[in-house]
Image (cartoon, rainbow, N blue to C red):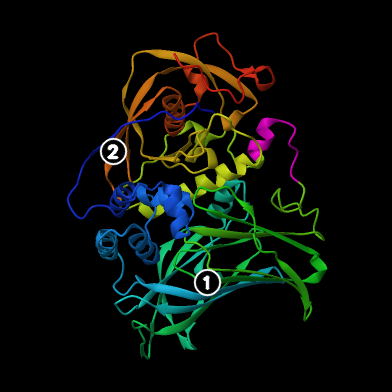
Amino acid sequence: MDTPRNEPHDEQHSGPSDGPRAFGDVLASWRKRRGMSKRALAEAMDYDPSYISHIEAGRYTAGEDFARRAEAKLSAAGEVWQAWHDTAQNTAATAPSGTPGGLVVEDDHAELRYADGIYTATMRRRLRNAGPDPVTHYLVRISVDRYPGEPARSNAHYRAHPLNWDELGLTADCDGEPMQWRPKHDRDSFKEVWLCFANDQGKFPLYPGERATITYAYTVPDTKWGPWFQRAVRLPTGRLGVTLAFPPALEPKVWGTETSTTAEAVPLHDPITCTQRAGETVFAWGTADPPMGARYRLEWRFRARPDDPDAPDNVGGAPPSLRTSSDRMKAAGIVQAGHPILAATAEPFDLPADAGEAREVIDALFAALQRVREHHVFGKGMGLAAPQIGIGRAAAIVIPPDPDADALVLLNPRVTDACAETDEQYEGCLSFFDVRGMVPRPLTLEVEHTTLDGQTKITAFPYGLARLVAHEIDHLAGRLYTSRMREGVKPIPVEEYRGIGQPWRQP
């Protein structure tokens, strides 16, 4: 959907306010006091500007390295560091004691091998405890997606064929000492596991200043593993590397992209090398000092399997038929009109208890928006709701047209007040993008929504931004914009629409 240029909006908070000030609020206060823009602070700290935005908005939790750099660059008399420390203590209260608060990954190397229909992932990380307390647990994530770009198809596939612990065969050790593990989250296509610095013979916590190398490995059949492998930087990391090893007979082709938070995906800055070794075609890639929040994704196709009937559309190298705008949106993973999920009410999040699930949905929405942008240029901004990527949860993202404006993340949004005055403008929807329709909307809206930490906010949205937000909230209620159109008014083909790239008219 399109939106005009972003207008200022006011925000007021309701709900709990006791406890230490949010780290993001303190960071923003000191940044403004020093007269620095988000971009200027990001450049001084060697971080992506969008990451600063997410930290200040409370959408992401800052790491220790980020907090130390911010304190140093802002000369905040210890307030920025203290705010981070207070926030970290509150967060630690909900995690097992001994979870990594000051861990640094000096070297992170991942190896993925494919043979006889099985993918084997081996992860090796050299850790240093730079914090003040012993570390007794380390969190790892295993996520699979057989049909990238087709979330509805993937969701149905994993409901019928869930990833299970037996086939994973997870093993882990610390400098050769076996590590016990226990599940944290167990979902059809996603697992989180605590690796414990302990086994039946004893405990071996990682004390402050100590180093250790942990290695863990698991297997996944190719019926549940898609043609991609992603590495996300969640701890300060000195070196990150990935090796992919495939049978030469499959004629593998590998490429990669990198992104951070809301930034567009771009080709990997460093090239991928290819060598032949011991009967395998080996692809290797690495980078030094990756920024926090960065994600690196390697993808591949097997050119010797161009006609695999069960392969996802983008594995064979050529895209599916993209004759129409809707074809392109479908190729980007957007659920199309007629799917039952678009007519259902999205399930709200119980926050902060569901914060982890909410973050996963937000990440999936941002990833889908990046795919959509590869198929279409949005001169008016855009929006996307979770049901449109096959997830029936109450989350939506709005991207204003101003490149310097922050993305709006809406969780459990609900319209609390609407201006009686309306106007009528053309709207488009990614779920049936071949047409545009004239839709009457209120000129302004007040929307109640929830933050990841469970706070309730009320935000006022004016004009075009109100229209865009209303469109996404309708999706969460199972409504399409066609149900808002005046009687007798019909959508027109996009070829007849002449407002592409132009802001909506202001009243």
Identity of the residue drawn at 48% across and 87% down: 175
Instruction: Tell me the element at label 2.
Output: strand
Tell me which residue sits at (77%, 74%) in the image.
275
Q: Nearer the viewer, residue 275 or 138?
A: 275
Disc assigned to residue 140: none
Which quadrant, please, contains the C terminus? top left
Judged from the image, the secondary structure of the residue bearing numbered disc 1 is helix
Coordinates of residue 26 in the picture (x, y in percent):
28, 52
Which quadrant of the rendered structure holds the N terminus?
top right
The answer to whether residue 359 shows anywhere in this view is no
Quadrant in the rendering for residue 328:
top right
Q: Amino acid at mark 1?
A: Asp
Vertical relation: 286 (above or below) 146: below
Q: Residues within 10 Å of mark 1 (few under 14, many from 20)?
A: few
The residue carrying mark 1 is 166
What type is the residue that disc 2 sits on? Lys
In percent of width and height, residue 274 lies at: 75, 70
First reached walking from the N terminus: tag 1 or tag 2: 1
Q: Which residue position holds label 2?
A: 457
Q: Which residues are drawn in magenta?
A: 319-330
Position of residue 242 measured from the top left corner of the image (x, y, whole percent): 62, 70
The answer to whether any part of residue 442 appears in the image is yes
Looking at the rendered image, the disc whose residue lies closer to the viewer, 1 or 2, is 2
In magenta stretch: residue 389: no
The extreme bottom residue here reads 201
Q: Most extreme residue toward the left, as rendered? A: 18
